[in-house]
Structures are given as structure tokens and as C-alpha cells.
Image (cartoon, rainbow, N blue to C red):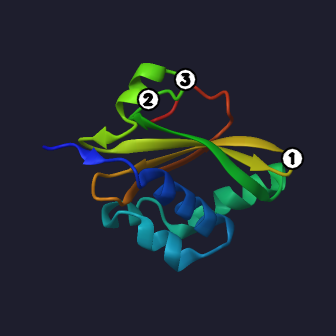
């Protein structure tokens, strides 16, 4: 399997997060891989986002994007650098979400086809995640 460019992955991640934050169900669900939609319905996504709004306030900015392999840590520079331009499978875009009252980390898993196959919102210091 030939490596594909990862140039568009941060844009895909940003777009999904913005659709979620703006309550744009159709647009967000369309970005999910068809195999993921049943396991990750909009109702679950919106429930989690509502909880985030309650605890952290409105999303202000998305920063510090890094592309890592599955289970990769954005602080592990060598792995991050290796995925900066090419990937042969699913990659994870790790971002900092700056909210009115704090920060979260997002981990958006994107397939080589450009569909979203995983969505996580975690505390910035989290180190245990499924992807």
C-alpha cells in the first residue's frame, strides 16, 4: 500500500470539530465513515459536546495540530515527524481545543480515504486512549 499525503488531515479534523460545535448534524455525520456511523451516532456526539460546553464553555480556537499514528503521542517527535507528510493507513490528528474556561485535547482518526473513523475529546494531560 503506497503512502498517501497527510496534508488534508488537519483540515478534515478542523471541519468536523467546527460542524460539531455549530450543531451541524448532517455535515458532521457525512464526514464519518459509513461503518462508524452506527457505533457513533449524532446523539452520542451531541451529548458529549453538550457536556463539554457545560464544563468548558464555547469553543474559541483550535491550535497545536499534530498528525500521529494510532495511539501515537504528539510529544513523541520522531513519530510525529514521520507522519507529517505521508501515511499508509489511519492517522490521528491531535489538536488543542481552547474553550472559554479551559482546554481539551481532540483526537480525530482519519482513514486513508479521508473519512473520520474515530472521535475523542480528552483532558490535555490524558495518556490512555483507544487510538
Q: Mark 1 against mark 3, which lies toward the viewer?
A: 3
The kind of secondary structure element at disc 1 is: loop
Q: Hey, which residue is sitting farthest left in the picture?
A: 1
The residue carrying pointer 2 sits among few (fewer than 14), some (14 to 19) or many (20 or more) residues within 10 Å by Cα, namely some
Residue 92 is at least partly visible in this image: yes
Q: Is residue 5 left or right of residue 32?
A: left
Q: In which quarter of the image is residue 17?
A: bottom right
Quarter of the rendering occupied by the C terminus: top left
Give the spatial CA distance, label 1 vs label 3: 24 Å
Residue at x-position 43% and y-position 42%: 92
Q: Mark 1 against mark 2, which lies toward the viewer?
A: 2
Residue at x-position 70% and y-position 42%: 104
Q: Where is residue 28 in the image (x, y as percent from the top left)?
A: 51, 70
The residue carrying pointer 1 sits among few (fewer than 14), some (14 to 19) or many (20 or more) residues within 10 Å by Cα, namely few
Give the spatial CA distance, label 3 vs label 2: 8 Å
Vertical order, 127 against 92 (above or below): above
The kind of secondary structure element at disc 3 is: loop
The kind of secondary structure element at disc 2 is: helix
| Residue named by callout 3 | 75
Q: Is residue 123 left or right of residue 3?
A: right
Q: Position of residue 125 (x, y in %)?
A: 67, 27
Residue at x-position 54% and y-position 68%: 42
Find residue 115 and name its label: none
Q: Closer to the N terminus: mark 1 or mark 2?
A: 2
Residue 38 is at least partly visible in this image: no
Q: Position of residue 16 (x, y in %)?
A: 53, 62
| Residue named by callout 1 | 101
| Residue named by callout 2 | 80
Q: Position of residue 10 (x, y in %)?
A: 49, 51
Q: Quadrant of residue 96?
A: top right
Q: Closer to the N terminus: mark 3 or mark 2?
A: 3
Amino acid at each position: 500500500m503506497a503512502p498517501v499525503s497527510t496534508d488534508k488531515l488537519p483540515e478534515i479534523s478542523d471541519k468536523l470539530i467546527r460542524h460539531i460545535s455549530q450543531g451541524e448534524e448532517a455535515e458532521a455525520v457525512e464526514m464519518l465513515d459509513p461503518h462508524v456511523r452506527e457505533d457513533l451516532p449524532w446523539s452520542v456526539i451531541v451529548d458529549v459536546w453538550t457536556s463539554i460546553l457545560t464544563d468548558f464553555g464555547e469553543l474559541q480556537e483550535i491550535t497545536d495540530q499534530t498528525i500521529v499514528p494510532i495511539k501515537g503521542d504528539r510529544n513523541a517527535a520522531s513519530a510525529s515527524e514521520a507522519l507529517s507528510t505521508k501515511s499508509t493507513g489511519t492517522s490521528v490528528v491531535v489538536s488543542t481545543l481552547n474553550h472559554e474556561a479551559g482546554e481539551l485535547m481532540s483526537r480525530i482518526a482519519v482513514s486513508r480515504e479521508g473519512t473520520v473513523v474515530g472521535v475523542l475529546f480528552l483532558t490535555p494531560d490524558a495518556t490512555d486512549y483507544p487510538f
